[in-house]
Image (spheres, rainbow, N blue to C red):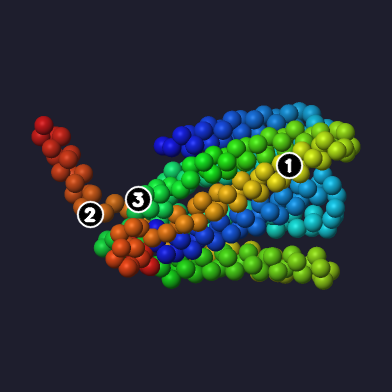
Amino acid sequence: MPTVTQWMIKAGMVHLVLALMLRVVSAVWPEVGAALGAVWWHGVVVGWLTQLIFAVAWWMFPTVSREARRGSEGWMWASGVGLNGGLLLRMVGEPGLAWSGGGGLWTALLWASAVAQVVSVGIWIVLMWPRVRAPRSAVRSGGTGSGGGR
Amino acid sequence: MPTLSRWFVRTALVWLGLGVSLGAALLVNKASGFAPMVWTLLPLHISFLLVGWALELALGVAWWLLPRLEDNRRVHPALGWGSWGLLTGGLVVEVAAQLWSVWMGGAGSAGFAVGSSMAVVGVLCFVVAVWRRVGFVPEEIRRWRQSRGGAERGG
């Protein structure tokens, strides 16, 4: 398993635990829950589920070529850092904005979070696009792989 | 990866890009309040990511990795393609209905009903197409297991 996959799966599990803890906090203190908004839900769906998919697909999808293998590992790290960083910024920024009633810092954090997540997902899509392909044997023989077109 | 899986997964990647971009617009709007009407697109953000991204990716990978039947076959390809068409088409109908209701002022509920019904039929097609493949063990594997069991008992 590639190192970046290991880190992202572990980060995903941390997000899952954090998100479920925030859910408990929201249930016990509804006013805190209101300030947290959709943070816990995004922790589960983006921080855990999407991150797990990103990491496992990077590991298991067909390689680009024998030479290039999975593609640029550096960009994959950038994608992982962007996704986690973006979520953490949101975790801080969203309650901050709700409690302060507005303000330059919190607005900036949410903007940074949105940009980081979009860029991170964009990088991952570009990395994975060429890996969604027929098996190498099928490409060599000009076909679509075993059972490829069926 | 078979052709149908490639279509499912690449379509899922497109929905992911759209869903996350829309999500970013919603988040930025929460911070800056630049266009309150963006909030009306929240149901689309959810549909893009749950149906378009997660569901289509899961079905594409399942079509690729579930065991194949005798003669190395992935049976019912027409149902598989029907499933992709109905799920993707259903989501496009939902988008059109939502945009119609936002900009033209009508209720988009009929469009939503049509779109989500298409998704249900699409998933049903997929379930029927892969039903026999779930847990299927090819004959050669079965024979190999039997011979191994025999060898273990003999040993």
Q: Residue under circle 2? A: B139
Name which residue type carries label 1: Ala
Is B56 placed above or below A14 here? below
Q: Tell me the chain of label 1.
A: A
For the residue marked with disc 2, what is the amino acid? Answer: Glu
Residue B92 x %, y %: 64, 67
Q: Is residue A52 visible?
A: no
Identified by mark 3, the residue type is Arg
Q: Residues within 10 Å of mark 1 (few under 14, many from 20)?
A: some
What residue is rendered at 71% in x and 41% in y? A113
A101 left or right of B17 in image: right
Q: Residue furthest right?
A: A101
Report which residue position mark 3 lands on.
A66
Q: Is residue A53 above or below residue B13?
A: above
Q: Quadrant of residue A150?
A: bottom left
Return the mark for residue A112.
Answer: 1
Could you tell me which residue is drawn at 17 percent across and 40 percent down? B148
Disc 2 on helix, strand or loop?
A: helix
Mark 3 or mark 2: which is in front?
A: 3
Q: Within the image, what quadrant is residue A84 found in?
A: top right
Q: CA distance from mark 2 to mark 1?
A: 56 Å
> Closer to the camera, B137 or B71?
B71
